[in-house]
């Protein structure tokens, strides 16, 4: 069976694994990871230059066929997120933007209210807006109405590798959203990515778990396969759970 | 003539120059640099045309790794 493409903002993607550029021990891993994982969209961040830094350009490590998804990390208000988005677009990063507005530095929980405000503004300006949010169905519907191209609920706090702690709430989004649901943040293992896809998530975004693996390219491949397996399981409609055994061989006596 | 600018939130004094001149003086790698001048992005091809003035606000940015 041929799976349909993931469509976000009118763009088609064959891969349902989105990746990130943070936390790699060496940036040279990024193109190797992208090749191994076949991920077609990757996040980048924008910052003031570090005067003592190497001035290495992260964009040099991302092949042209991979869509850039700049994030608004560092933004604490909708206005700051809007400003970062406009700068990223002006700088040639295209129309995609992941809205990330965070004021809580302990758990890095997104500020859903500011994120909605930023989504309203940026969608009107023609951005393809992917808001990163706590999974809240009421908010998700407002984001859709505001023009969000996808909803990105967190599975667990950023970088925590704890998996789908918000699973029942994500399930509500999957059940009710018109736009794609991309589970972002907290996915630590390929099995957790597969679990999200089995539920019917349209895609997952994985950064830390891939970037901090000893071999990020191999881990990228592992996540790619897990996402594909989970997606196929979802399309195949999984068998139901049962509290008792259901024999898979005939229960009649062997010689009867 | 020495002018005072706010660059990435810090007051700095330097000889009057263009954005291109500033990038050269600071030894920055142009290819990776995003320049916001008084709230407006200036494309690299225009850096030599923008003469910095006393009191200007500059943000010198670049893309970095992020999730």
Image (tube, coloured by chain):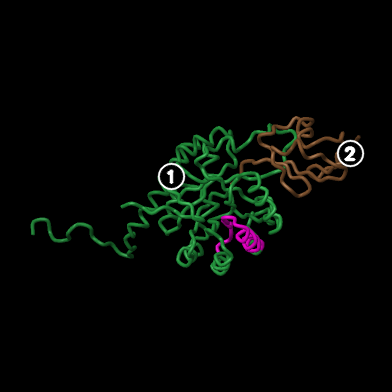
Q: Which of marks 2 and 1 is in front?
A: 2
Q: Nearer the viewer, residue A199 or A101?
A: A101
Q: Is mark 1 on a helix, strand or loop?
A: helix
| In the image, residue A115 lies in the stretch drawn in magenta | yes
| In the image, residue B28 lies in the stretch drawn in magenta | no
Horizontal and vertical percent for residue A239? 31, 60
Q: Nearer the viewer, residue A148 or A204?
A: A148
Quadrant including the C terminus of chain A: bottom left
The image quadrant of residue A128 is bottom right
Residue placed furthest toward the bottom: A138
Classify 10 Å Cα crowding around label 1: few (below 14), some (14-19), many (20 and above): many
Horizontal and vertical percent for residue A38? 45, 42
Q: Residue at 88% of width from left, 43% of height from top?
A: B54
Q: Which residue carries the number 1 mark? A: A224
Q: Which residue carries the number 2 mark? A: B3
Q: Compared with residue A125, is residue A45 higher up or lower down, i.e. above or below?
A: above
Q: Compared with residue A188, is residue A58 higher up or lower down, i.e. above or below?
A: above
- The picture's colour for chain A is green
- Asked if residue A143 lies left or right of residue A75, the reply is left
Q: The brown chain is which one?
A: B
Q: Return the mark for residue A133.
A: none
First to last magenta residue range? A114-135
Classify 10 Å Cα crowding around label 2: few (below 14), some (14-19), many (20 and above): some
Q: Compared with residue B52, is residue A250 higher up or lower down, i.e. above or below?
A: below
């Amino acid at each position: 069976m041929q799976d349909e493409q993931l469509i976000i903002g009118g763009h088609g993607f064959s891969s349902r694994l989105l990746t990130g550029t943070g936390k790699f021990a060496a940036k040279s891993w990024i193109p190797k990871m992208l090749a191994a994982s076949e991920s077609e969209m990757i996040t980048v961040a924008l910052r003031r230059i570090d005067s003592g830094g190497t001035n290495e350009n992260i964009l040099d490590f991302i092949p042209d066929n991979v869509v850039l998804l700049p994030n608004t990390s560092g933004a604490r208000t909708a206005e700051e997120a809007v400003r970062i988005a406009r700068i990223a677009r002006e700088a040639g990063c295209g129309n995609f933007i992941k809205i990330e507005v965070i004021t809580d530095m302990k758990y890095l929980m997104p500020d859903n209210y500011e994120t909605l405000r930023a989504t309203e503004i940026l969608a009107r300006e023609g951005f393809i807006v992917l808001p990163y949010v706590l999974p809240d169905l009421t908010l998700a519907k407002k984001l859709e109405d505001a023009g969000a191209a996808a909803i990105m609920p967190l599975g667990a706090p950023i970088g925590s590798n704890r998996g789908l702690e918000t699973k029942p709430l994500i399930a509500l989004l999957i059940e009710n959203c018109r736009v794609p649901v991309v589970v972002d943040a907290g996915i630590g293992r390929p099995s957790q990515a597969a679990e999200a896809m089995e539920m019917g998530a349209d895609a997952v975004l994985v950064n830390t778990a891939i970037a901090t693996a000893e071999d990020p390219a191999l881990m990228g491949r592992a996540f790619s396969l897990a996402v594909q397996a989970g997606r196929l399981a979802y399309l195949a409609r999984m068998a139901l759970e049962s509290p008792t055994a259901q024999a898979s061989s005939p229960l009649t006596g062997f010689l009867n | 003539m020495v002018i005072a600018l706010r660059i990435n939130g810090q007051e700095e004094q330097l000889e009057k120059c263009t954005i291109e001149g500033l990038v050269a003086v600071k030894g920055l790698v142009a290819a990776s640099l995003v320049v916001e001048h008084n709230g407006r992005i200036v494309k690299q091809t225009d850096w030599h045309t923008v003469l910095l003035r006393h009191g200007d606000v500059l943000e010198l940015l670049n893309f970095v790794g992020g999730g």
